[in-house]
Image (tube, rainbow, N blue to C red):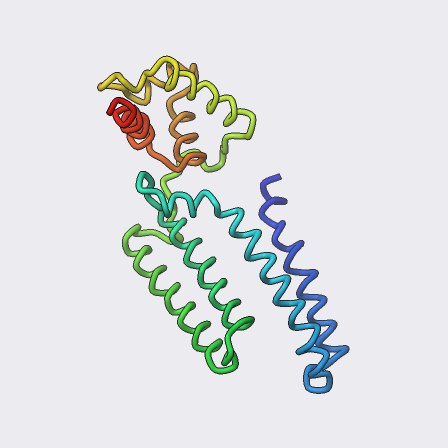
Amino acid sequence: MAENKGLRWLLHILPISLIVCVLGITYPYLSYHILWSKFIIPVIHLVWLLYIILAGIQLKIVFKNFFSKDSTLKDIEVWMLSIYLGIAVIWLGYTVGSYTSYIVGMLSFLFVFYLVILFWILKRKRKNLFFEENIKYADKKIDFEEAKSIAIDLFIVMQEKRIFENPNLKLADVSKELNIQPHNLSQYLNDNLGKSFPMFVNKYRIENLQKLR
């Protein structure tokens, strides 16, 4: 199942690449310049934009963490945002720019150069390849139903039992209240909420102080 998920990108890349190749052979650009400029290229840009939008939806949690003061981005999230924003800029240059024939090459080069530098910096920082995050349970993702159950129970212990008022509150204390393993709670907070345990608890404490004022 995991291997099938990893190859899903082929279902997108292969058909589109095949269509473009067939069009290029059947209707060469030099012979059908008007057809390409008026119809084929705008359709390519539209499909490109659709994938940018869909990718943005997939990265909504990363964007939320980027604009949140209570969350910090992981190296891999910085990498994904850099790729996403770079591709969006290149699409904008191709689609909207008045002088795309002159600037697209420069934009593409600068984008790739930036990613290479970023990769090199983070690689030196992490001392390993491709930012192998310290995700102990990356191969055991919390499924939707389990995450939903944890969210409901966590809301109850935080809002109704007000367990956050305990100044010595620990992750193990909350996981005991939820009747789950501490690593499952930690994984839920990090993967689903993008917060560490201290950040999560402090959010409730800060909100409580604001209500008391």
For residue 198, what is the image quadrant?
top left
- In the image, is 45 to the left or to the right of 100? right
Q: Position of residue 103 (x, y in %)?
A: 46, 78
- Depth check, front residue: 113 or 189: 189
- In the image, is 133 to the left or to the right of 104? left
The extreme bottom residue here reads: 31
Q: Position of residue 30 (x, y in %)?
A: 68, 86
The extreme right residue here reads: 26
Q: In percent of the image, x 42 and y 17: which residue is there?
A: 156
Q: In percent of the image, x 46 and y 72: which residue is there?
A: 108
In the rendered image of this protein, does residue 66 appear above or below residue 30? above
Q: In percent of the image, x 40 and y 31: which residue is there?
A: 189
In the rendered image of this protein, does residue 120 appear above or below residue 26? above
In the rendered image of this protein, does residue 58 appear above or below residue 104? above
- In the image, is 132 to the left or to the right of 90? left
- Depth check, front residue: 131 or 90: 90
Q: How many marks?
A: 0
Q: Position of residue 77 (x, y in %)?
A: 40, 49
Q: In percent of the image, x 31 and y 30: which residue is there?
A: 203
For residue 109, what is the image quadrant?
bottom left
The extreme front residue here reads: 213
Quarter of the figure with the C terminus: top left
